[in-house]
Image: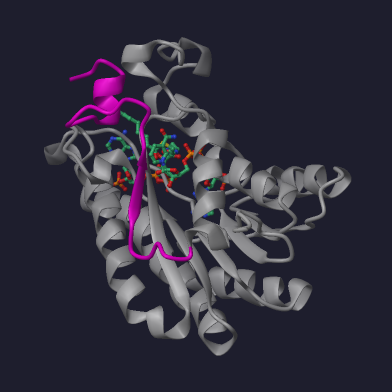
Amino acid sequence: MHEPKFGVAGETAIVTGASQGIGESIAKTLAAGGANVAICSRSMDRVGPVAEEINESDTDGEALAVECNVRERDQVQNLVDETVDEFGDIDVLVNNAGGEFVAPFEEISENGWQTIVDLNLNSTVHCTQLAGEVMREGSGGVIVNLSSVNGQHAAPGESHYGASKAAIIRLTETLAVEWAEHDIRVNCVAPGLVQTPGVAETLGIDSEDMPPRENAERRIGHPEEIADVVQFLVSPAASFMNGETVTAKGVPRAGNSMSQDLGLE
Ligand SMILES: CCCCC/C=C/C(=O)SCCNC(=O)CCNC(=O)[C@H](O)C(C)(C)COP(=O)(O)OP(=O)(O)OC[C@H]1O[C@@H](n2cnc3c(N)ncnc32)[C@H](O)[C@@H]1OP(=O)(O)O
Ligand SMILES: NC(=O)C1=CN([C@@H]2O[C@H](COP(=O)(O)OP(=O)(O)OC[C@H]3O[C@@H](n4cnc5c(N)ncnc54)[C@H](OP(=O)(O)O)[C@@H]3O)[C@@H](O)[C@H]2O)C=CC1
């Protein structure tokens, strides 16, 4: 009889950007599955309570909070070092930290463009190179990157974000090939619109004002629905998946972008 292998018990995972939203949900899901999680954000005041909540719960996995701005390579090296010191190894990396502002291409300054590319793409490069070094020297591992449907389809006001998220998809595909010999799988998740504090801030609206999630035409996701996909990709159940981008957007129509979900297109 074939035993399903969806577990992550005993693994050590780094989850970036885990003080709220999708990253917080991924961290809690992996910890509930028995993984030890090293979680970071730019502020210990924000990420510390998430680690405390995990450690005070009855999950098997433990949490370590680290203050780390993933745009700064030396801070990422510290995150990697603290994770290895605490848990002994790194089996899983989830490159979740990311963000954007919405602006027409001609109104994005050089620094504005650089900020979004640094936050989404270059941070993924820092984390993947530095945690990947530990994985390559050890027994391999699994990496999951967060892209977006706006990295797959055009959306107005999202040129910088879309370009950085599209690049993450191609980086995923390339690394899956390059690092297969090191037993490192690299996959990607492309969410549609998910109800998080970051989206509420980006759009300048309260979470409650978003289109209702249960509306079949404009279904909006919950962070847990992305976390479950990540958990699957991390687990041995996805052992034959490498270099893939899994889209999780609720509504299976062509050309779906987040601004369509919001009725902005
Ligand atoms: C249709 C919409 C669908 C929604 C899609 C959602 C996708 C997501 O990823 S949602 C979850 C992510 N969370 C967030 O995006 C959080 C909200 N955003 C932010 O926290 C920030 O805007 C930031 C992280 C993206 C940048 O913050 P920071 O590093 O502090 O950068 P600065 O404020 O110093 O700005 C740097 C640079 O960028 C220019 N800029 C900032 N906002 C805008 C804007 N709205 N329009 C045009 N330009 C902007 C800013 O002016 C700076 O450039 P210079 O002035 O040239 O120095
Ligand atoms: N929500 C959505 O609709 C979608 C989201 N995504 C992607 O999913 C990921 C998570 O999004 P979401 O949960 O909505 O985002 P949120 O803005 O709600 O949360 C972002 C998290 O990242 C942290 N963070 C931001 N900048 C940095 C940084 N420089 N270094 C370390 N941590 C940082 C924040 O913590 P702190 O502020 O404490 O540093 C926070 O924990 C992002 O990559 C996003 O682009 C993709 C498609 C759709």
Q: Nearer the viewer, residue 44 or 136?
A: 136
Q: Which residues are magenta?
A: 239-265
Q: Nearer the viewer, residue 130 or 36?
A: 36
On the image, the x and y values in percent for residue 1 come to 62, 58
On the image, the x and y values in percent for residue 138 come to 59, 86
Q: How many marks?
A: 0
Identified at 71% across, 59% down, the residue is: 35
Give yes or no for residue 262 being in the magenta stretch: yes
Q: Quadrant of the C terminus?
A: top left
Q: Nearer the viewer, residue 114 or 129?
A: 129
The answer to which quarter of the image holds residue 12 is: bottom right
Instruction: Judge whether 199 appears above or below 135 on screen.
Output: above
Instruction: Judge whether 11 appears above or below 177 on screen.
Output: above
Identified at 27% across, 53% down, the residue is: 164
Residue 69 appears in the picture as rendered = no
Outermost residue, left direction? 106
The answer to which quarter of the image holds residue 210 is: top left
Left or right of residue 68: residue 240: left
Left or right of residue 107: residue 125: right
Question: Could you tell me what secondary structure mostly forms the magenta stretch?
Answer: loop
Give yes or no for residue 49 being in the magenta stretch: no
Outermost residue, bottom direction? 137
Left or right of residue 125: residue 110: left
